[in-house]
Each structure stands twice: as C-alpha cells, then as structure tokens.
Image: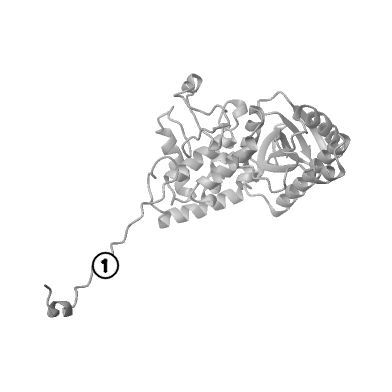
Amino acid sequence: MVGSDSLNTPLSPSPPPVEQKRPPKQWGVTRPLSLAGPSDADIQRNRELEKFLVDSGLYESAEEAAKREEVLGRLKQIVKNWVKELTRLRGYTDQMVEDANAVIFTFGSYRLGYSHALNILHSNLGAENEYMDLELTLIHCVGPSYVSREEDFFYVLHNILAEMEEVTELQPVPDAHVPVMKFKFDGISIDLLYASISLLVVPDDLDISNNSVLYNIDEPTVRSLNGCRVADQILKLVPNVENFRTTLRCLKFWAKRRGVYSNVTGFLGGVNWALLVARLCQFYPKANPSMLVSRFFRVYTLWRWPNPVMLFEIEDDELGFSVWDPRKNPWDRNHLMPIITPAYLA
C-alpha cells in the first residue's frame, strides 16, 4: 500500500526529449560525397567565374529573350491554326473545331533555363570576325490523335511554313531517329518536333511529365516527347537549380571552345553534359559553381566506366517500352559510357 506521504512527494522532472537528427536529404542514388559549403575563397572565385561568363557573352540579353519569346508566341498560334484547319477539313463539328488545339513545349537549354547568345569565331579570308547568333531553340509540338506526323506535320504544316517570309532554311528530316523539321524563324534557329497523343482535344495545361501522355503511342513518339520530360526531371532532381545552370553554362562553353561538344560529331551532346553536371550537383549539394567546375573533372576522370551515371533509380512501367537494363538487355551490356536519362523510358 502506498502511503499519503509518497503521493505528496514531488516527482522528479522527466528528461528532455532527445532531438532526433534527420539524416541529410539524399539526392540521387547514393549519399553525397561532401556536404561542405563554399569557403570565402570559393565565394571570391565564384564571383570571378560569373564575371567571366558575363564578359564572354554567355547570358542572353533582354532584347534577345524578348525576340525569342515573340517567335515562340507566333509559332504557338501557327500550330493552333494548323490543327483547327485540319479539324474543320475533316468534317468535325463546329464545337470540335473551336476546341481543337496544339501546344508547344521547349526543351534543351531553353527549358533548362540557361539559353544564351553564342560567340562564334569564324575565319573570313584570313581575318577573324566575331558575330552573335541566338542558340538553337528546341520545340515540341503536341497535337490530337487525328493529326499525324507523316502527312499533316511533314506535309501540311511544312507547306504552311514554306510560304511564310519569316521562315528560311526549312529542312524536314522525317527519317531521323527523332523526326524533326529544322528552319529559321525570323533569324532564330528552330528544331520543331511533333507528337500525336491519344486525346481528341489537347488542353493548354497538358502535363507533359505525367506518364499518362505516353498511353497508346509508338516508341518514336515517346522518344520525341522525352526531351521535354527529361529537362523537367533534371530541374527537380538537382539541389540548387541556379548553381546547376551556372556550372552547366561554364562547362558547355569549355567544351565548345575545345571542339569536343556535339553528339553529331561523336562527342557528348547537350543532354549528356546536363546529366553529368546534375549528378555532380547531387554529389556536392552545397557547393557553388566554382567548386563544382573543378570537381567535375576530378569526379569523371576517376569514374569507373561503364558504371552508369543516373540521377535516380530507373523506373520500369506497365507501358511495355524497353528501358536501359543490362541485366535484361544484352545490347545494353556493350555500352561503354552509359549516361541515363531520368524520365521513362530511360
């Protein structure tokens, strides 16, 4: 039996709760190599790096950005009118004609947010001249199920563009790995792709990142859509988007100045450089661009190829397309330098 004195004895205070330390957020498929931030010297070097990039003309001016936006707006209206006219000619109802729509998405450097004017040195009769040219703009047009790539895009839309004064150097490439129309619109170089998805009406707010857009379409269409989807995923998977953009801007400039840029000539292309830089940002989530640039060469000099560079675990989906997997696909085992995109299909 407990006495009353015991009941009146003050209880000893309970110990304060132990604060649970959360493990640092993991970016990518492994833990960071370092969580160190920049020192004062790194901050100073970063200021010098950014000044160098500005002085080298690697940032798009307000006028150039406005011109590019104007061209995108005009192209948006052109493809909308193209789809509406096709809808009318095929005998759909007036309501369908009114609702008919196509949307455009940018991808590549513009979608990643570091588009710029390129300083290009070329030789003319022994004299070096410098001129500015706006960087290539990659655009994906997405239309309804009844508008085809083969006839409607490469024939009807091609003819519409061919009759426009603003359009020059129009070149359709229907047999490319990813079919494309190349042209200049008011001086801006454009690569225009097309995908027909399984919707009768394409909404203006179509979420291109949702795997549902891939239902009931063929593999070439999936490949063409992946440019936009990969860019969106990269921006979601890096710890600091601005540090990623500055580092990528610098390394692409370095590669182009040394003639080792472009997959057309057997080197790494834009998406490859973006993925390598994004993985580096995951390894050093608190590093600034000056730190990341120097670590880039150290990390990939020591990389044990053919171990893949990937931003997250590969997702297999019920849609049935083949994804990169050397355990299942014998041809994937022959890849010497696999750099895996972070959007299905990888």
Residue in the image at 78% along x and 41% along y:
187
Residue 27 lies in quadrant: top left
Q: Is residue 295 visible?
A: yes
Percent across and percent down for residue 120 are 66, 39
Classify mark 1: helix, strand or loop. loop
Q: Nearer the viewer, residue 229 or 256?
A: 229
Q: Nearer the viewer, residue 209 or 164?
A: 209
Q: Quadrant of the N terminus?
A: bottom left
Residue 215 lies in quadrant: top right
Q: In the rendered image of this protein, does residue 332 appear above or below residue 129? A: above
Residue in the image at 84% along x and 32% along y:
156
Percent across and percent down for residue 280 are 46, 42
Q: Is residue 166 visible?
A: no
Q: In the rendered image of this protein, does residue 71 appear above or below residue 44? A: above
> Tag 1: Cα neighbours inside 10 Å, few (<14), some, or many (≥20)?
few
Q: Quadrant of the C terminus?
A: top right
- The amino acid type of the residue labelled 1 equals Pro
Q: Nearer the viewer, residue 133 or 248?
A: 248
Colour mapping used in the image: one colour
Residue marked by disc 1 = 16
Q: Is residue 87 left or right of residue 314?
A: right
Residue in the image at 57% along x and 39% along y:
252
Percent across and percent down for residue 134 are 70, 43
**Residue ranking furthest to the front:** 1
Residue in the image at 44% along x and 35% along y:
300
